[in-house]
Image (cartoon, helix red, strand yellow):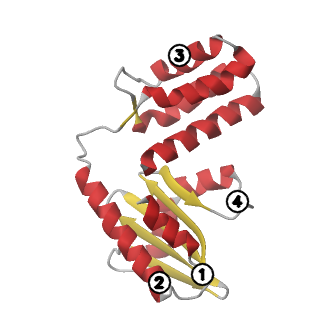
Amino acid sequence: MKNLLTSLVKLDEVNAVLVSREGQPVFSYLPEFFSSEIQDVLFQSFDEIFAALDQKRETPTQELVALFESGSVVVKNVKDYQVLLVLKSSVPGPLVSVALNALTLKLEKLANSKSPKTQELIPLVLFNEIVKLLAKHYGPAAKLIVKKSLLKAEATDKGLPLVNVSMFLKALQEQIDENHLAQQAINKTKDIIRSWRMQ
């Protein structure tokens, strides 16, 4: 999937690409002026964006294109995944359409291969990066901070359930006394999870 997304963002008419799964970020390519806070709001707002664009239609659709004078927005629902595409052109060109169709097929395949009964678990070894980040400030206590946060988020030896990431981030934030450091740890965690999900 990473190659498909890389190909898509390389196209001249593509301004931005966001992919989420059930409100959780999977991939984002946005211009630099989009802050991480704006990205989080966009990821959480897929359903609202789609509903707003789809409200005037009598039958539900899987893809919507909103046209503007200086570009267009494509919102696509693919099983558990949502794709938001911001284009410079008013109508998606043939290359964008081909790339988007290829991405859709890949996402459908991924959604079908992951049974809803199988809970996605984030390997605990990935959280060593957060320990390293916090160790600069907290020393050996950093490991305890991360471990306690994982336990609060109901992590097991097998990993942290993906659906409990927000619980982990909240627990982590509560234990870090410096706001700047807490935000660094939260952003680092989100980056690690995005990279893991892209594999």
Q: Position of residue 46 (x, y in %)?
A: 49, 60
Residue with the mark numbered 3:
148
Crowding at label 1, few (<14), some or many (≥20) Cα neighbours within 10 Å? Answer: some
Q: Label 2 is placed on what type of residue?
A: Leu
Residues tagged 3 and 1 counted as in contact (Cβ below 8 A): no
Residue located at (46% from left, 43% from top): 196
* Pointer 4 residue: 34
- Secondary structure, mark 4, is loop
Find residue 95 and name its label.
2
At numbered mark 3, what does the secondary structure look like: helix, strand or loop? helix
Q: What's the amino acid at mark 3?
A: Lys
Nearest to viewer (mark 3 / mark 2): 2
Residue 88, image x, y percentages: 63, 81
Secondary structure at badge 1 equals loop
Tell me the distance, in whole angstroms, between the alpha carbons under discs 3 and 2.
48 Å
Q: Residue at x 64, y 40 (%)?
A: 187
Q: CA distance from mark 3 to mark 4?
A: 32 Å
Task: Please give the residue where the numbered disc 1 appears in the rendered image.
Answer: 13
Q: Amino acid at mark 1?
A: Glu
Given contact means CB atoms under 8 Å apart, are the residues at marks 2 and 1 in contact?
yes
